[in-house]
Image (spheres, helix red, strand yellow):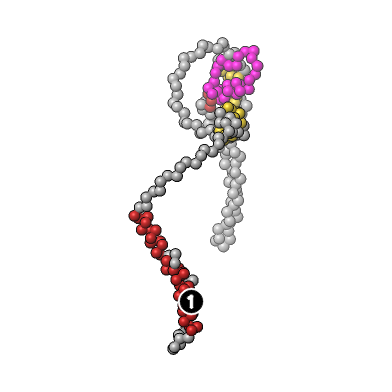
């Protein structure tokens, strides 16, 4: 938030959010002030003494490396700002020095101004996510008829309504049976199907009659002829329908 020179109002209680907003606004103004250049680099360390001369033409060993010089002082920078609420601000530096006071018109808050004209409508925001599904609505789950002109309506949540008068009354007596209608005509296709079905099962009528499986002597005996007559009678009875 930008700095507002009209806040805080004199005599009002301290509001942390309001003061924080004012300090942040001043800091934003101070951040654009260029900082001082970094301090000079410290002097280099002294060069170590040379090593002893080598013998028999061999070079001597190198001397030890000199120690690194101390680091130079840290550059100055703006570390903060102090606002006394009377239109004066003091800039604090990292080395403890200060600049100011500067006039920043941060005196007591003036009376509230008139409301400005209403701005134009902003662009439409993105569509929000659909909300969670609401509870299931009630609906009619059934109805009970007592048969005595009363009906009770059942709801899906277990509730009931009624009894309501519906004039259903008890069931009446069964009416008399109507006269039998005339016999319908049989179509040609139905007749043909019935004949085919009857003929198809005719060959099975003699399945219960066993074979004689005998050899007739010459001349045949009375027993053999009687067995043939008995089996013939059995076949005739099986073929009758």
Asked whether 213 or 41 is in front, the reply is 213
Could you classify mark 1 by the number of other residues whose Cα lies within 10 Å: few (under 14), some (14-19), or many (20 or more)?
few
Residue 194: % across, % down: 39, 58
When asked about the image quadrant of residue 195, the answer is bottom left
Asked whether 36 or 185 is in front, the reply is 185
Residue 192: % across, % down: 36, 58
Q: Is residue 69 magenta?
A: no
User: Residue placed at 59% from the left, 38% from the top?
Assistant: 71
Residue 221: % across, % down: 48, 86
User: Residue placed at 62% from the left, 17% from the top?
Assistant: 84
Q: Disc 1 designates what residue? A: 230
Residue 223: % across, % down: 50, 83
Q: Is residue 155 visible?
A: no
Left or right position of 236 against 46: left
Asked whether 54 or 210 is in front, the reply is 210
When asked about the image quadrant of residue 68, the answer is top right
| SS class, disc 1 | helix
Asked whether 206 or 157 is in front, the reply is 206
Q: What stretch is highlighted in magenta?
A: 1-27
User: Residue placed at 55% from the left, 36% from the top?
Assistant: 173
Say above or below: 12 vs 146.
Answer: above
Say above or below: 170 vs 236.
Answer: above
User: Residue placed at 37% from the left, 56% from the top?
Assistant: 191
Say above or below: 134 vs 118.
Answer: below
Residue at the farthest bottom position: 218
Say above or below: 86 vs 187.
Answer: above
Location of the C terminus by quadrant is bottom left
Q: Is residue 24 magenta?
A: yes
When asked about the image quadrant of residue 120, the answer is top left
Q: How many marks?
A: 1
């Amino acid at each position: 938030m930008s700095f507002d020179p009209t806040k805080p109002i004199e005599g009002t209680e301290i509001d942390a959010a309001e003061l924080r907003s004012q300090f942040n606004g001043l800091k934003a103004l101070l951040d654009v002030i260029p900082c001082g250049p970094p301090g000079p680099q410290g002097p280099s360390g002294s060069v170590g003494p040379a090593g002893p001369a080598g013998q028999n033409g061999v070079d001597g060993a190198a001397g030890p490396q000199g120690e690194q010089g101390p680091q130079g002082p840290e550059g100055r920078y703006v570390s903060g700002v102090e606002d006394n609420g009377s239109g004066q601000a003091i800039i604090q530096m990292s080395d403890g020095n200060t600049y100011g006071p500067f006039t920043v018109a941060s005196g007591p808050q003036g009376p509230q101004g008139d409301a400005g004209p209403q701005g134009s409508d902003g662009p439409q925001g993105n569509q929000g996510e659909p909300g969670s599904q609401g509870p299931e609505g009630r609906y009619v789950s059934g109805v009970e008829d007592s048969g005595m002109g009363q009906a009770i309506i059942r709801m899906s949540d277990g509730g009931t309504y009624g009894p309501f008068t519906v004039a259903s009354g008890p069931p009446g007596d069964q009416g008399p049976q109507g006269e039998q209608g005339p016999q319908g005509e049989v179509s040609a296709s139905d007749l043909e199907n019935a004949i085919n079905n009857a003929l198809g099962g005719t060959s099975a009528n003699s399945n219960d009659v066993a074979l004689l499986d005998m050899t007739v002597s010459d001349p045949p005996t009375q027993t053999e002829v009687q067995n043939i007559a008995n089996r013939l009678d059995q076949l005739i009875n099986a073929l009758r329908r």
